[in-house]
């Protein structure tokens, strides 16, 4: 059984980077955590103990998600859940038992720094990233 400890981050896609940053920083009080530059197109904002990642749709990362957000196109790229410590094998076994396929583990940056994570899909095709400090097997 997986134990969710919280939301690590969400990823929003935008064609209006400056307006999004002004809203989340100036209006909501988030702070700038990281900016990977215009080519990659990822800006990460600190929101309490979680992150809000904002990706420009005309960047390397943004183009992977399709066209710009609109009334008919989604702007949520994925949701990342922080799990209690679990080994890669335990996570694989739990998801396999539930009939859920997972990507390979990769090291990615999240609210608690760099760490291993995997991607899965929910029944509607939404991407969910699962992150955890790895437990010993």
Image: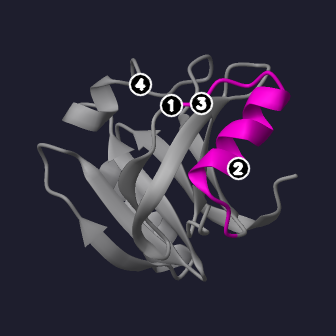
Residue beneath disc 1: 103
Precedes in sequence: disc 4 or disc 3:
4
Residue beneath disc 3: 102
Q: Position of residue 31 (x, y in %)?
A: 42, 81
Q: Position of residue 63 (x, y in %)?
A: 29, 25
Precedes in sequence: disc 4 or disc 2:
4
Q: Is residue 29 above or below residue 121?
A: below
Q: Residues within 10 Å of mark 2 (few under 14, many from 20)?
A: some
Q: Is residue 98 magenta?
A: yes
Label 4 – label 2 distance at C-alpha: 30 Å
Q: Is residue 102 magenta?
A: yes
Residue beneath disc 2: 90
> Circles 3 and 1: CB distance less than 8 Å?
yes
Residue 64 in view here: yes
At horizontal 45% and vertical 57% (from top left) the residue drawn is 116
Q: Residues within 10 Å of mark 1 (few under 14, many from 20)?
A: few
Q: Position of residue 90 (x, y in %)?
A: 70, 49
Q: Is residue 106 above or below residue 101?
A: below
Q: In front of the other: label 4 or label 3?
A: 3
Could you tell me which secondary element the residue under label 1 belongs to? loop
Precedes in sequence: disc 1 or disc 4:
4
Q: Which residues are magenta?
A: 85-103
Could you tell me which secondary element the residue under label 4 belongs to? loop
Label 4 – label 3 distance at C-alpha: 19 Å
């Amino acid at each position: 059984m997986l134990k969710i400890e919280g939301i690590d981050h969400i990823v929003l896609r935008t064609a209006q980077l400056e307006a999004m940053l002004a809203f989340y920083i100036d209006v909501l009080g988030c702070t700038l955590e990281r900016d990977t530059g215009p080519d990659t197109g990822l800006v990460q904002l600190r929101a309490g103990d979680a992150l809000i990642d904002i990706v420009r749709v005309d960047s390397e990362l943004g183009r992977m998600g399709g066209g710009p957000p609109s009334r008919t196109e989604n702007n949520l790229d994925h949701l990342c859940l922080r799990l209690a410590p679990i080994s890669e094998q335990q996570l694989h076994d739990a998801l396999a038992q539930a009939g859920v396929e997972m990507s390979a583990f990769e090291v990615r940056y999240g609210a608690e720094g760099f760490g291993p994570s995997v991607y899965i899909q929910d029944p509607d095709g939404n991407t969910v990233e699962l992150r955890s400090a790895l437990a010993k097997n």
